[in-house]
Amino acid sequence: MNDNVTIFDHPLIQHKLSILRDKRTSSKDFRDLVSEIAMLMCYEATRDLPLQNVEIETPICKTTVKQLAGKKLAVVPILRAGLGMVDGMLRMVPSARVGHIGLYRDEKTMQPVEYFCKLPKDIEKRDVFVVDPMLATGGSGIDAISQIKQRHPKSIRFLCLIAAPEGIEALSKAHPDVHIYCAAQDEKLNDKCYIVPGLGDAGDRIFGTK
Ligand code: PRP
Ligand code: URA
C-alpha cells in the first residue's frame, strides 16, 4: 500500500458510506451523510496537529492544558461536489478559512476545465485541506492542487470519500508531497471514467441536478 494514502476503515464511516452508495438514497440524506462523513474524516485527518501547553484557571485552580499550537487551517472544496464536505469540516475546525476552486470534467476529454479560484489571502501561512468526494482519474485533484501550490501554502492534504486506484496513482505521482485520505478505494474506472462501484455523480446527487 502507498504510504501517501490513508483509508479510513472506521465502522461509522464505512456504514455511512454504504448508505451513500445506494441509488435509493435521497438528495437530502445524501447531503447529510456527505457532511457527517467529512466531519469524521476531519477528526481523523487532523490527528497529527501539534499541541501546545497553555495556562488557564478552572473554577477550582490554575492548571496547564493543551491547545492547538496556533495552527491556521484552510478548507478548499473543489466545486461543486466538494461543497458538500465543507460544513462537516467546519464543524470540527470552525476557525478554518474556506477557499473555492471551480473545476468540472469535460465529458468528452475527461480533462478538468477551470472556471473559478478564490483562496484565502494568507494561504502561505495555512495548512490546506482540499476536499472533493470523488478521486476518479485524478485530473481535477491534480489541477486544483497545482493551482493552490502557486500560492505556496504550508502544506496540502487531499480528502475524498471514494478513490479509484487510477486517481490515487496519478495524484501521488503528480504531487508526492500531498497525503490522500479516503473512506474507500474502489475497484476501477468504467469507460466513462466513473468509479466502479462508486456512488454515481456526486455533484448531481448532492444538488439533485439529474
Ligand atoms: C466530479 C468530482 C471531482 C471529479 C473527479 O466533479 O466531484 O471533482 O469529478 O473526477 P476526476 O478525478 O476524473 O477529475 P464533476 O466534474 O462531475 O463536477 P461537479 O462537481 O460540478 O458535478
Ligand atoms: N465524478 C463523480 O462524481 N463520480 C465518479 O464516479 C467519477 C467522477
Image (cartoon, helix red, strand yellow):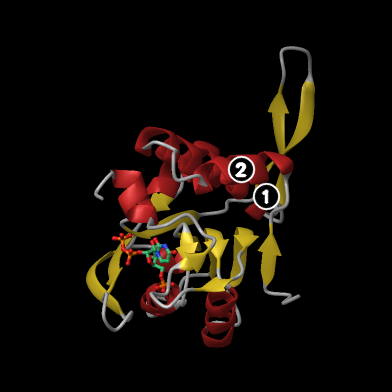
User: Where on the image, by quarter, is ligand 1?
Assistant: bottom left
Give percent across and percent down for residue 114.
25, 74
Q: Please state, as top left, top right, bottom left or bottom right, where the N terminus lies in the image.
A: bottom right
- Residue count near mark 1 (Cα–Cα under 10 Å), binned few <14, some 14–19, many ≥20: some
> Within 10 angstroms of label 2, few (less than 14), some, or many (20 or more) residues?
some
Amino acid identity at mark 1: Glu
Residue at image mark 2 = 40
Q: Which residue is mark 1?
A: 44
Toward the bottom, the furthest residue is 173
Give the Cα separation between the discs numbered 1 and 2.
Answer: 7 Å
Residue 81 appears in the picture as rendered: no
Q: Residue at x 55, y 79 (%)?
A: 166
Hey, which quadrant is residue 149 in on the image? bottom left
Residue 173 visible, this angle: yes
Q: Which mark is residue 94?
A: none
* Residue 34 to residue 122: above or below: above
Q: Nearer the viewer, residue 110 or 115?
A: 110
Q: Quadrant of residue 40?
A: top right
Say what amino acid the circle numbered 2 marks: Leu
The residue sitting at 47% across, 62% down in the picture is 134
Residue 2 in percent (x, y) is at 72, 77
Q: Nearer the viewer, residue 123 or 171?
A: 171
- Residue extending farthest to the left is 115
Q: Secondary structure at mark 2?
A: helix
Looking at this view, is 177 or 73 the one in front? 177
Q: Residue furthest top?
A: 59
| In contact (CB < 8 Å): disc 1 and disc 2 | yes
Q: Position of residue 59 (x, y in %)?
A: 72, 12
The picture places residue 46, in percent across and down from the top left corner, at 64, 52
Residue at point 50%, 36% (across, down): 91
**Secondary structure found at label 1:** helix
